Amino acid sequence: MEVKDKQESYLNTSRITLARFELTRSQTSLFLILSLIGIFMLPFTLAEDVFLNLFQFLFSILPDYLIDSSHRPEGYLIFSFFPILIRIIVSTIFLFLSIYVLRKILRHKNVKHKVKGKIIQQNRTVNWFGLRISHGQSLFIFSISLAGIFFTIQQFLESLLYPFSGFGLLESFCWIPEGPNQTTSHVILLNNVPLALMATFFLLCLYSLLTVRRGKPMNPSKKITNNYGLLIFIASLAVLILLSARIFCHLALFNNEFASLLGISSNAPNPYQNEDFIRTISFLCICLALMIASFFLKDKIYKESKTSDDFTWLHVKLTPHRALILLSVALLYIIFFTNYYLTILFLYGGVDEFYVNLYYIILIPVILFCYYPIGKILKNRRFDNIIENIENSREFKTNWFKFHLSKTNSIIFLSVSIGLVGLYIYQLILMNTYAQSLLQDSYSFKAYMLFSFPVITVIISLLLVVIVYTIKKTLPSIKFSK
């Protein structure tokens, strides 16, 4: 009886939770991958913002302003400084969260304490916008909603400091064609529609954060929305909101009654505007159809998992450690390229420049290529079986700084490190090319760059040293067979 009580006590104290969400071993591994990606990538982002952007303000923009401020608009220093500060704060918050998750997971077995508050159990389903989703899908919605709130706040604060330029993604929905190579909009729309869109996405993320924490016990007789259906619904909902804003701008600019309510002088409809309006309505209907279709893409709650030996990727047989390495690298690069794509999209959203369209053509297939192995490995609970096979193989332990890594965690550290080697070598080459181009341009070159570029190079080199050290410590983990 005492042994049973001790076992139950151990189970209660050893349960891993994040934000009170109970995690399975496979979910813990996924969060460990994401936290490692944040810890290794965010220092470079912070270094760029501090040693390039912030130094540019301190040693170039500020001195020029103090010498002659007559030609500068009111609030020029605020507009230049606070966007940099906001990005630094947001990156620091995400870095802190990444470190917190890493420490919580790796030190979990050494910390014997009961979780305070009510634990959000695994055996539940959640109703989110009418979709019946699982606990794991709720964790996914919670994570992207949390990131979405920070991103939306960042965009909102930057929009308050910067007058809308009219070239970003949200502003691009306000510009309506009225002739060949001609567009029209109004300052009221440019100032308010983007803010309304950001408020809508913020409320959507806030609603999702609160909703996914509440659920009902699982009913095995019912089905849940599968992962593809959930992704289709999320993407379609986001596009639907953006297209709704464009329809609103059409009505505000070309409908007399609607324009008078807003105090805008309406324009006469023309074939270019009509064509764009019909195209927008068509895309909106497609989004609605996809959202409706996602309700019919369902899976059984309890579905037989396949062993890792039963599937391949591009004709390569995936053993458990190969599958874990592939998943980690795919997650790393899908985050990197998605962030790169969204940055371009929000900066140059609706323009027709050739190089931006070229980025679209290149980045979207790369993102889809990265998602393919992720979807394949996570499908039918394969990842649960992969983690179980690795943990049941020969025991392996190693030390990484002050942390003790199990075999599963060692393979995760190895996988992320392998993916980051190529990424940071690319960043070193890119930084060297950028520095050389500025050195040759006497107009753009500033004295602070003689310090900034070497410091960033040193930071990248230090990160590479840590990455190589990690690979050396964890490489033996894949040499141990069952």
Image (cartoon, rainbow, N blue to C red):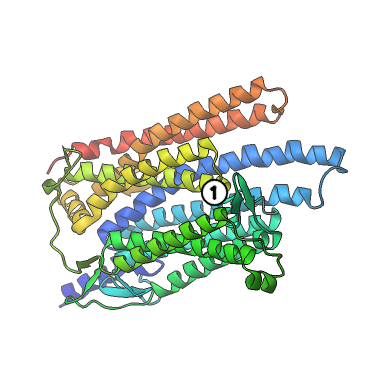
Please tell me which residue is depicted at 17% across the width and 68% down the height of the picture: 302
Quadrant (top left/top right/bottom left/bottom right) for the N terminus: bottom left
Q: Nearer the viewer, residue 313 or 62?
A: 313
Instruction: Tell whether 6 sits left or right of 54.
Output: left
**Residue 52 screen position, x and y as percent:** 63, 37
Instruction: Tell whether 409 sits left or right of 320.
Output: right
Please tell me which residue is depicted at 25% across the width and 68% down the height of the picture: 296
How many numbered discs sit on the rendered protein? 1
The amino acid on which the numbered mark 1 sits, given as a three-letter code, is Gly
**Residue 247 screen position, x and y as percent:** 54, 64
Q: Which residue is mark 1?
A: 349
Instruction: Tell whether 47 sits left or right of 239.
Output: right
Please tell me which residue is depicted at 70% across the width and 28% down the height of the picture: 444
Quadrant (top left/top right/bottom left/bottom right) for the C terminus: top left
**Residue 306 screen position, x and y as percent:** 13, 55
Q: Nearer the viewer, residue 121 or 263?
A: 263
Q: Nearer the viewer, residue 232 or 461?
A: 232
Look at the numbered disc 1 and give the secondary structure of its residue. Answer: loop
**Residue 100 screen position, x and y as percent:** 45, 56
Classed neighbour count for the residue bearing mark 1: other residues with Cα under 10 Å, few (<14), some (14–19), many (≥20): some
Vertical placement of 436 versus 468: above or below?
A: above
User: Toward which corner of the image does residue 222 lie, by quadrant?
Assistant: bottom left
Vertical placement of 116 versus 377: above or below?
A: below
User: Toward which corner of the image does residue 113 lie, by quadrant?
Assistant: bottom left
Determine if residue 330 is in view: yes
Instruction: Tell whether 62 sits left or right of 345.
Output: right
Determine if residue 144 is in view: no
